[in-house]
Image: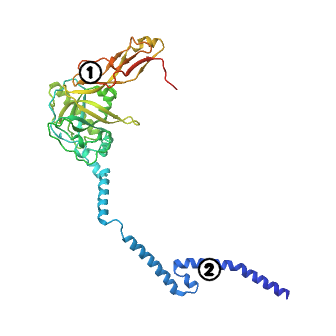
Amino acid sequence: MALAFAAMRCASGATASLLPAARGWAVSMFTSGLYHGIGASVLGGGQLAGSQAARARHDTTAVAQRASEQQVVPEEILRELRQLEDSLHSAARLDGRRRSSLPLSASALPGPLPAHIIEPGLPALDAHVRPAAATGGIACKWLRRAGRVPGRVHSLPGAGVSADAVGSDAAGQDEGPSTSTISSSSSNNNNVLLLHFSEQDVNKLVRSFGRNGCTARVLQLNIVAPGDEAAATEAGAAAAAAEANAAAAAAEQRGGVGASTSGRQLGMLRVKPTRVFVNAVTQRVEGLDLLYCPPQRQVVVDVPVRLVNDDLAPGIKKGGWMALFRRTVRYKALGNAIPPYVEINARNLDLDQEVLVRDMPIPPGTKLYEKNYNAPVLRCTTDVGKD
């Protein structure tokens, strides 16, 4: 009797231990059956409950499809947005096919150049004309990759591209839509001619005169046509520059303006650099702004300051040093009287003495054009500044 009672207790204990496992199995089968359509058959519902679950899933899918078909934004507005997106995408990016066929140089000027006198002996710089399709930041980027420097000539009377349609492409910024219009009005003296130069020529110019010294120099700009389709590339640009130099030398010997021996020179301009854009990281020249500067035109020039005899100054012998506050001084000068630099003779400068703007020398044909004439330009001091 005792053995039978013990056997019954063991059996009841085993059954009690199996109940949680069986309950968990049933719940898992019911949960999976809701998705597969067999949960009702496991629990005794048969195939009817499974088909109902499948029908419920089909109804849910149909509701989702109907919800996706109901558009919140009308189709007309979506069509306009897609067109706008496509236009912005095409304007902001050039694929390989368009990039390879993009003309970077024009074979003709957009308008006649003004007649003016160019004296011989000026530093020469060769340039190609940019067509209307080669404007904007994207085209300037590919010009720089081809070894060219984008630039422009300002203040041309009655020729070139309207200044309102140019923007800031010489610095590499976007110009917006390419609506470059040609202006032929003789009363408009603020037209712009878009060009690009050889990077080697521009680097040589900056190395010869300095970044600040370039703005106080007058150049002879030789505008030449490309020899072939590869003239805007690095090899083609070198060949075109060689031909332009030969044509410029022949024209200088003749003494004529716009003379050409090979027919590839489109014209010449007397210009003055106004701004040189240099990349702060790579130190590459990325843009060059020029100003049309005939001999009798009044222009504003930032003339570099050059010190002479500063080592003989009494203040230097007493332990002082020269503190230069202004590297350039602004003058207004005629086009044929622009000084390349102004000299400050510091031979008699003692300690705590300074040279003001009003004490600067005034070359012939110029006058000072500063706002504060009492601003210091140079001072002999022993002050090393504050920590």
Left or right side of 31 for 145: left
Q: Is residue 177 above or below residue 151?
A: below
Left or right side of 168 for 317: right
Mark 2–mark 1 CB contact (< 8 Å): no
**Name of the residue lying farthest toward the right:** 2
Look at discs 2 and 1 and give the one toward the viewer.
Answer: 1
The amino acid type of the residue labelled 2 equals Ala
Instruction: Assign the N terminus to one quadrant of the image.
Output: bottom right
Q: Is residue 41 above or below residue 306?
A: below
Sequence-first tag of 2 and 1? 2
User: Pointer 2: residues within 10 angstroms few (<14), some, or many (20+)?
Assistant: some
Q: Is residue 333 above or below residue 72?
A: above
Element at label 1:
strand
The amino acid type of the residue labelled 1 equals Lys
Element at label 2:
helix
Instruction: Give percent across and percent down for residue 248.
Output: 20, 29
Closer-to-camera residue (336/96) = 336
Closer-to-camera residue (123/370) = 370
In this figure, which residue is indicated by the disc labeled 2?
A: 26
Numbered badge on residue 165 = none
Numbered badge on residue 367 = 1
Left or right side of 251 for 201: right
Give the quarter of the image for residue 115. Answer: top left
- Residue drawn at x 25%, y 37% as measured from the top left: 152
Instruction: Give percent across and percent down for residue 112.
Output: 15, 37
